[in-house]
Amino acid sequence: MTDYSGARAIVVGGSIGGLTSALLLRQLGFDVDVFERTPTPLDNRGGGIVLQPTTMKWFDGHSARRIEELSVASCWLRYLGPANEVQYEGAFDWRSTSWGTVYRALLDDFGDAHYHHGQACIGLLQDADCVELSFGTGRVERADLVVFADGVTSTGRQLLYPAVRPRYSGYVGWRGTVREDQVTAETRAALADAVTYSVAPHTHAVMYTIPGMDGELEHGRRLLNYVWYRNVADGDDLRELTTDIRGFENPVSLHPGAVQQRFVNEMRTAAAEQLAPAVAEVIGATEQPFLQVISDTGTPGMVQGRIAVIGDAAFSVRPHPAAGSAKAAADAWALHDHLQAHGGEIVQALKAWEPGQLELGGRLLERAAAMGARSQVTNTWTPGDPDLLPGLYAPGR
């Protein structure tokens, strides 16, 4: 096994992809530090995620935790109609969790000693032997390898590929969670053990169960998590919706409690009119729904010299394939494997790693956009269509 002892790696961005990458680089012998721009832990951001096999891979013998301790199993894929009737139901063996639950487990595995909060990267220089990063605090750090895993608003992407800009999809995702014991027994039964869809003209919602706020797996204390996709015209309509209660525009997302109440009220009314009653009840019961602007972003490259860009920092895709966290994990695992295979030659390993991950990101970007068009534009999102299954590499995979 290649040993990178004595070499230093820096990961910019301390989310799921960044922590996975940091843990894998440390396994190879690198001295690894993670620099995260936010000043406090990233707990409970992003709501729920459907776990793809690649996302779970770290927890198969590498972690102090098992995935069964961190997630909820679903047995069915279910579509509900206007009266809660089952329009389609098929076997669906997947697991779901909350972003915060996985983040906490990965951070526990990595530890706090080399995880640095409040460090926003603002610049970089590199030569043949070293990358130098500058931070807003005045800190300067040097490393043999730098991995940017800093998400949708990636500084690394902006510095390396300044011409790349997100492309708005034409719709937003309303998101939120409600404890199981806060909805009726009828709604709990309609949603039980399933990833559930409700589809209406030019819109659809997806809902599934995730662990509670502190990772609880007991029935009643778990959370019902959803994303509801709604079309919003670009321009004034989008700017008004994404202006928060303080009057600031948020082009990427609005956190819980930041959305103007008039829009929350309208959203709840529309849910009752358009969606299956069980799904609408959960949405209506959400105290502080939040908002995600759905966009497409893809880079022409993922490597420059000793720098790699992974996950959402490279390809930010629509959530329909439920593969954003999985793509970040896949990038990290592939990088680990190429570094291991190239005998300590970091630059050569990155060059060999890049083509496959670019191809994977491009395919996922196109498939996610096609899935979104079927529900939000062409009204061809058909209950039970296997092409609409979640998956990183292909539908259902």
Image: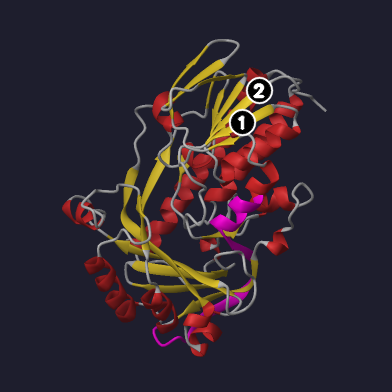
Q: Amino acid at mark 2?
A: Arg
Given residues 90 and 33, the one toward you in this image is 33
Q: Quadrant of residue 171?
A: bottom left
Q: Is residue 230 left or right of residue 103?
A: left
Tell me the colour scheme of the image: secondary structure
Return the x and y of residue 298 as percentages of the image width and height: 43, 38
Rendered image: mark on residue 33: 1
Check disc 2 and report the residue beneath it: 8
Q: 10 Å neighbourhood of mark 2: few (<14), some, or many (≥20)?
A: some
Q: Quadrant of the C terminus?
A: bottom right
Residue 395 visible, this angle: no
Q: Quadrant of the N terminus?
A: top right
- Vertical position of residue 264 compared to residue 237: above or below: below
Q: Earlier in the sequence, mark 2 or mark 1?
A: 2
Rendered image: mark on residue 197: none
Q: Which residues are magenta?
A: 82-105
Given residues 216 and 371, the one toward you in this image is 216
